[in-house]
């Protein structure tokens, strides 16, 4: 740890050295001032250039043709404004010149990097880790090692997602609405103020808003795996100077990139693979069931989830669409201004469910007594014979291909989304503004998952949930003097969630269907305040505080059904729990603007996240009792500097977290049946890290971006008591054994030690000797690299610390991407050829250890190599 602190001290010396160099320069330098990417929440006017309407939306009517207007025939290089992709002021604040650990991306760069949804940001934003076990929903997010690896419908992320200013609580809808985007900002570090007690950080996605002039664009993409994709927008003035509308949408259709060797027909009986299913590189031992039904079993499709579903080939496809309609109204007033922005949106996913890769494990042979221990070691291969072990159905996949498998259940993920929000801005006076934001979101999700990733009905899951949420934020922004600004407001949130899940467990002689049904009601009130005070000409003190009072109630019912005898859990599990949490969070920072081109800041943040219920309470023995709120003390120092007349911008931060009662999701397995999802609190953890970013334009047309991050994390105190159902091989008697697992000193989940990303791009004008303009060529190369990532607190050895090293870990990997674009002379047309993951790297985005219950580990993999071309027109 001492060596890491030395690294931090060195980094701090570098930052202050850069600032000192800048301090020697002229005070009246003409260097450009770094300005935060404006969000629709921010009513502040920029210092010069593009005007903003009263709700903070770029007013393109003030932009002359040829300026940086992507949709007005410009298609300008996003890097021409290097400032827009730097560590900038906190988005949405009433001030915009205070440096902070926020990394922002323009619409053009998101398009160039082929960012399709929030999960793709993980590959271009260091210290942001996003994994996904579902096809189109429920991402798991970590920022600087802080997050919650919970895939349940009621998951409460430590990373707050905001879409057009609206807090998206349900994880089911967090991946949609990523089209016609104006900008995206990742706020790294705990948030207080207006960003809902996000202990890890926040991701803000802002859509392009209506503008006074007519403009439109459309793009079409075709790529490998028969990828067909279209995106477009139409902006029209309805009433001159009063009402404008913008309609936008996107669709994506793509074949699956995973070969299903069982594809082609319907299943005919319980636990029977299709007759056409062959295993050219797999092994099915005599322990497997070759087909048919167990004696006395009634072939009722209600007891074989997905029995009537076709067996698809290929799998892991994409079928989704989304649309948005926005209307911006300027209300005439005798004094002041008033604007209302209505946003109505929706989408649908019609693709298949995600298919996993499976690795079979079994206990090592040896002394029978040692095998009774809860942490007895597992292995993939029998050390005596060298043969691979199989899962509990007798299956093992040995081909090593992460994009091929034997799946007797194609599954599906049906997701419907509808939402609307109304944002109002009233400028009462020059120094007083009132902002209101009302939001409503609804979803309905139905996912049939082939959880066992094999050709038998060992474990099949049906997830069904629907929810609606309503939120209202009202705040008052005041500009008291030239040196004092404030923002005070309140936030109200309510959500109704209904869940009905079924789990088919066929590990025994006949299947059991576990049924879990629950509802959860959430009601939350918050009050927040923010202020900025220029103590001296170049010294600013700012702070914010938030008080939250949150009420949650859960009604839970779960039981088991056996097709032979009916209900098997005579006691059922009927439970009702009510919890109330109240807490404070806040931030204080001091910023010194050394010159117009450089500044440094010191910041302390008290993060707080309320507790929530265990959404995986399947068995009667599993309690739905909530976890405790988590608390985080963050200490941060950072700075930024602009050098060489703005050709080089450097920014960085060093931070330390003292993390208490962090919330952890784990799968407890008793070796007898379905694994039991747990929500627990780790006693404490510490995080030390640093971030450094460079943006440069050394010559006209050449732009370079490089970001790197370092993390050192560990659980300072974390123990968990588990139990395991065991059977004595001598007496045949069964019992439970308790054991305490100690993760103290281990590295935290989702926290790679190093991560980096970068891009280089050159705009080459195509002007022939006779002076004819043929447009321009824009070659671009980008990369990202991540160190090892662990998916459980066992540092890759599983939650029971009994798997081989690296089993639940993704090894370091790099992704290389390239594109070549041609733009017409007037900027109206553009054709781009692109390739992602050039080397076709295999990398895991999630791993689940289910060895105790079913003798396998599940892996979800990121996308393979993809390539294609995109044609766009911008008017």
Image (tube, grey):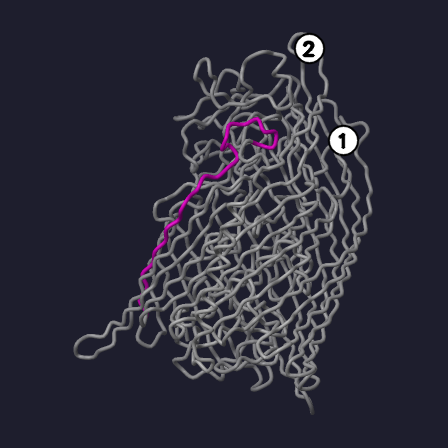
Q: Nearer the viewer, residue 204 or 60?
A: 204
Query: Which residues are the magenta region?
Result: 798-823
Q: Which mark is residue 732?
A: 2
Q: Which mark is residue 293?
A: none
Residue 874 vs residue 369: left or right? left
Residue 436 vs residue 657: left or right? right
Residue tagged 1: 621
Quadrant that contains the N terminus: top right
Residue at 51% x, 40% y: name it. Answer: 860
Of label 1 and label 2, which has the lower sequence position?
1
Quadrant that contains the C terminus: bottom left
The image shows a total of numbered marks equal to: 2
- The answer, for residue 270, to whether it is visible in the render is no
- CB atoms of marks 1 and 2 within 8 Å: no
Residue at 25% x, 73% y: name it. Answer: 774
Residue at 56% x, 20% y: name it. Answer: 363
Could you say where residue 627 lies in the image, as x and y percent from the top left? 74, 43
Residue 415 vs residue 561: left or right? left
- The answer, for residue 347, to whether it is visible in the render is yes
Q: Secondary structure at mark 1?
A: loop
Asked if residue 133 is positioned above or below residue 188 in the image, the reply reads: above
Asked if residue 69 is positioned above or below residue 453 in the image, the reply reads: below
Q: Is residue 686 magenta?
A: no
Could you say where residue 771 lies in the image, as x and y percent from the top left? 20, 79
**Residue reaching furthest top?**
730
Q: Rounded to the nearest whole Å, what is the CA distance between mark 1 and mark 2?
A: 24 Å
Could you say where residue 37 lies in the image, as x and y percent from the top left? 52, 70
Q: Nearer the viewer, residue 332 or 271?
A: 332
């Amino acid at each position: 740890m001492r060596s890491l602190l030395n690294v931090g001290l060195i980094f701090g010396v570098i930052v202050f050295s850069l600032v000192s160099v800048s301090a020697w320069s002229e005070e009246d330098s003409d260097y450009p001032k770094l300005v935060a990417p404006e969000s629709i929440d921010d009513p502040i006017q920029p210092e010069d250039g593009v005007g903003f309407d009263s709700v903070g939306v770029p007013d393109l009517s003030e932009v002359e043709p040829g300026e940086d207007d992507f949709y007005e025939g410009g298609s300008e290089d996003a890097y021409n404004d290097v400032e827009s992709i730097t560590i900038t002021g906190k988005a949405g604040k009433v001030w915009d010149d205070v440096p902070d650990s926020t990394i922002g991306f323009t619409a053009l760069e998101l398009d160039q990097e082929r960012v399709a949804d929030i999960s793709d940001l993980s590959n271009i934003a260091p210290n942001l880790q996003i994994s996904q076990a579902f096809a189109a929903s429920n991402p798991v997010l970590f920022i600087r090692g802080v997050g919650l690896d919970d895939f349940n419908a009621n998951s409460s992320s430590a990373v707050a997602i905001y879409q057009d200013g609206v807090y998206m609580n349900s994880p089911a809808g967090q991946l949609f609405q990523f089209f016609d985007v104006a900008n995206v900002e990742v706020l790294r570090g705990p948030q207080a103020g207006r960003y809902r007690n996000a202990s890890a950080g926040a991701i803000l996605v802002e859509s392009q808003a209506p503008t006074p002039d007519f403009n439109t664009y459309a793009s079409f993409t075709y790529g490998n795996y028969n990828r067909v994709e279209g995106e477009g927008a139409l902006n029209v003035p309805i009433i001159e100077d009063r009402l404008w509308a913008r309609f936008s949408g996107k669709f994506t259709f793509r074949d699956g990139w995973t070969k299903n060797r069982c594809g082609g027909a319907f299943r005919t009986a319980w636990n029977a693979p299709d007759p056409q299913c062959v295993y050219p590189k797999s092994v099915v031992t005599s322990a497997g069931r070759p087909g048919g039904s167990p004696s006395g079993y009634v072939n009722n499709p209600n007891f074989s989830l997905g029995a009537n579903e076709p067996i698809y080939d290929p799998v892991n496809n994409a079928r989704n669409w989304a649309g948005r309609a926005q209307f911006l109204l300027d209300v005439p007033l005798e004094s002041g201004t008033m604007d209302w922005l209505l946003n109505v949106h929706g989408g649908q996913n019609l693709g298949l469910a995600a298919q996993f890769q499976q690795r079979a494990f079994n206990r090592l042979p040896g002394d029978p007594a040692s095998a009774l221990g809860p942490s007895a070691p597992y292995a993939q291969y029998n050390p005596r014979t060298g043969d691979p072990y199989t899962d509990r159905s007798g299956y093992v996949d040995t081909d090593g291909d992460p994009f091929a498998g034997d799946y007797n259940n194609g599954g599906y993920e049906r997701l419907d989304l509808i939402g609307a929000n109304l944002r109002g801005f009233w400028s009462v006076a020059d120094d007083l503004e009132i902002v209101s934001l009302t939001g409503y979101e609804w979803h309905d999700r139905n996912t049939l998952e082939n959880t066992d990733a094999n050709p038998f009905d060992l474990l099949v899951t049906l997830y069904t949930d629907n929810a609606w949420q309503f939120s209202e934020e009202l705040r008052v922004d005041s500009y008291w003097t030239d040196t004092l600004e404030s923002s005070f407001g309140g936030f109200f949130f309510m959500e109704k969630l209904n869940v009905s899940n079924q789990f088919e467990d066929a590990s025994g002689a006949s299947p059991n269907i576990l049924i879990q049904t629950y509802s959860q009601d959430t009601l939350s009130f918050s009050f927040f305040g923010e202020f900025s005070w220029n103590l001296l000409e170049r010294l600013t003190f700012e702070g914010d505080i938030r008080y939250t009072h949150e009420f949650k109630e859960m009604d839970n019912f779960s039981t088991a059904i056996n097709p032979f005898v009916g209900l098997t859990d005579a006691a059922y599990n009927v439970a009702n729990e009510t919890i109330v949490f109240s807490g404070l969070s806040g931030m204080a920072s001091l910023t010194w603007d050394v010159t117009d081109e450089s500044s440094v800041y010191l910041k302390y943040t008290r993060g707080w996240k309320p507790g929530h219920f265990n959404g995986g309470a399947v068995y009667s023995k599993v309690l739905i009792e909530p976890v405790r709120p988590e608390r985080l003390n963050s200490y941060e120092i950072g700075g930024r500097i602009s050098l060489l007349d703005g050709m080089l911008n450097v920014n960085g931060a060093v931070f330390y977290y003292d993390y208490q009662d962090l919330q952890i999701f784990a799968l407890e397995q008793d070796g007898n049946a379905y694994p039991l999802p747990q929500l627990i609190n780790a006693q404490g953890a510490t995080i030390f890290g640093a971030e450094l970013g460079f943006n440069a334009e050394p010559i006209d047309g050449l732009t370079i971006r490089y970001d790197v991050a370092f993390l050192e994390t560990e659980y300072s105190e974390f123990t968990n008591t588990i139990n395991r159902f065991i059977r004595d091989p001598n007496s045949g008697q069964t019992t439970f054994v308790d054991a305490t697992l100690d993760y103290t000193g281990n590295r935290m989940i989702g926290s790679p030690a190093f991560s980096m990303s970068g891009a280089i791009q050159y705009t080459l004008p195509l002007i022939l000797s006779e002076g004819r303009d043929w447009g321009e060529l824009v070659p671009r190369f980008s990369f990202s690299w991540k160190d090892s990532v662990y998916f459980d607190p066992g540092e890759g050895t599983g939650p029971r610390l009994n798997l081989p090293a690296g089993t639940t870990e993704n090894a370091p990997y790099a992704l290389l991407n390239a594109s070549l674009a041609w733009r017409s002379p007037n900027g109206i047309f553009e054709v781009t050829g692109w390739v992602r993951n050039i080397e076709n790297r295999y990398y895991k985005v999630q791993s689940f250890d289910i060895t105790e219950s079913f003798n396998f580990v599940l892996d979800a993999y990121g996308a393979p190599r993809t390539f294609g071309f995109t044609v766009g027109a911008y008017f």
